[in-house]
Amino acid sequence: MIKVIHPGFFTTIQDMGRFGYRDKGVPVCGCMDNYSASMANSLLENAEMDAVMEITMTGPKLEFQTTSFFSITGAEMSPALNGVPINSYEVHKANEGDILSFGKLLNGFRSYLAVKGGFLTETKLMSRSFYKTITDQNCLKERMEIPIKEYSEYSPKIAHIKPEATQKELELNVYKGPEYNILTDDQLKLLFTNKFTIAKENNRMAYQLEELIGVQSHKMLTSATLPGTVQLTPAGKLIILMRDGQTTGGYPRILQLATKSIAMLSQKKFGDEVSFHFLSH
Amino acid sequence: MSSHPILVRPFGEHAILIEWPNKVSEDILYDILDFAESFKLDFKDSKNWELVPAYNSVTLINRRTKIDFSKIKYQLLECYESRKASGPPLRYLWKLPVCYDLEFGVDLEEVATNLNCSIKEIIEAHTHNIYTVYGIGFLPGFMYLGGLPKDLETPRKSVPRLKVHKGSVGLAGKQTGIYPQDSPGGWNIIGNCPVTLFNANLENPCFISVGDQIQFYAINRSEYDLHKIEAEVGIYNLDKIKIDD
């Protein structure tokens, strides 16, 4: 078990997602920055679908009640084991009673903590990803106990991975969305020459952008949306749907983010800037 | 089997959007569902794909690999054109109970005033019609229902409620629907359905599928309480009728 002494700002258990239920309105969920999460699992030679802990902005304080091995990737949040600073992107051993804590957020927005064998919270609809109304919990709470396997011996094949320097990038690679053609010349110019600021309305469901690009009055029938779909509201606001985003929507889908850019955007926070870079299929 | 002009387009790196003519029509919806059935049966590696049908479109999402669009486009068109006329997939008409007491139908009086009719007339019109499920989305288990009579069209509330209770039956514009869980919402609430529409503990969490039909029937408060208890212990037997074309 790992005992939650303090849950942090918003900490969840996530795997690579909940597939096969989108026709019933169930979002795919899963790690927002799945590249960083995969690296955390790779270091421990975990399976692809093993669940990790997604830590947002402020880290939790956790007590290992079981001896195990762990790794941390993604945003740099100054992790420490029993108060001694440790490196991200490395395998560490935690003995029974050890305390893992986090400090100052130095870059990015979401960290991933993996343990050897994965976090063994309940599986609902083929996935352990937390989602309100599907899993019993929607985020970590104080005193919660999270099941993990015991490992007293493990010699990692790779002791350290060099992180990709994506935290400072601001260009989101985008393809045309299904309703791209409703955009006016003025809107296109704004979209591809301006920088956009992440609004305070940003979470696992969607990231809103502050700057408006002009009103639209396109009427369409409700149709599927995906993580990375950029919607344009009638008021001209841009909303980028993320992993917990709704599966259908009625706003024009003007752009679609490249998969890697969804992970990159997940490391952005309120006030950060992004721009769009056009890719053709 | 009818055939429509369809448009196949890429939707990001992992998905493809196929669109039928832009209108709300059962004929189009059933053609989409028939295509979806053929795809699941005939398309190689169809197990790696998720299909999201809604109104006049279906989106195909590959969970494993990036898509080679130009190659797959022709395979999909081929799959659409060469379908065997198997007829539309099995569909059901579900009869769902609704308690229209004012305790649940908190906007009934206001809607009656707006529509210039009696509450009784609203209930009669709402239960008389048969609705088609054109999509499931917005929330897990939320159905987009088509077929609302014109007499019941009423604008959504100008200020949305922060909390609409699970099971609430609402009216908004040309739509009617049921909130499958507590949620913020701007629809006019006219009643409550005691049936659990979405249950994440079941292998199939939502028994209703796109293409099915819904008819409501009015129940009183004590029947509502009984259904609620039955739903909680899971012994509830819904009336469903197989739809034959």
Image (tube, grey):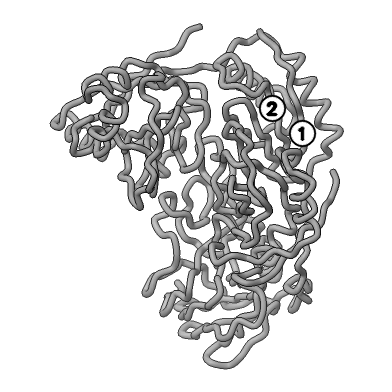
The image quadrant where one finds the C terminus of chain A is top right
Q: Marks 1 and 2, how far apart in space? A: 8 Å
Q: In the rendered structure, the residue with mark 1 lies on which chain?
A: B
Would you place residue A103 above or below residue A11 in this image?
below
- Kindly state the secondary structure of the residue where label 2 is placed: strand
Is the residue under label 2 in contact with that under label 1 (CB below 8 Å)? yes
Residue bearing the label numbered 1: B9
Give the amino acid type for the residue marked by disc 1 in the picture: Arg
Quadrant of res B202:
top left
Quadrant of res B147:
top left
Residue A142 is situated, as x and y percent measured from the top left of the image, at 38, 74
The crowding category of the residue bearing disc 2, from other C-alpha atoms within 10 Å (few below 14, some 14 to 19, many at least 20), is: many
Is A103 positioned to the left or the right of A230 in the image?
Answer: left
Q: Which residue is depicted at the point 61% across and 77% down?
A: A153
Q: Residue furthest left?
A: B222
Would you place residue A280 above or below residue A112 in this image?
above
Is A146 positioned to the left or the right of A259 in the image?
Answer: left
Q: Which residue is depicted at the point 66% across and 48% down?
A: A229
Q: Which residue is depicted at the point 55% across and 71% down?
A: A55
Residue B25 numbered tag: none
Q: In the rendered structure, the residue with mark 2 lies on which chain?
A: B
Residue B148 is situated, as x and y percent measured from the top left of the image, at 41, 22
Residue A158 is situated, as x and y percent measured from the top left of the image, at 76, 74
Residue A45 appears anywhere in the view: no
- Kindly state the secondary structure of the residue where label 1 is placed: strand
Residue bearing the label numbered 2: B19
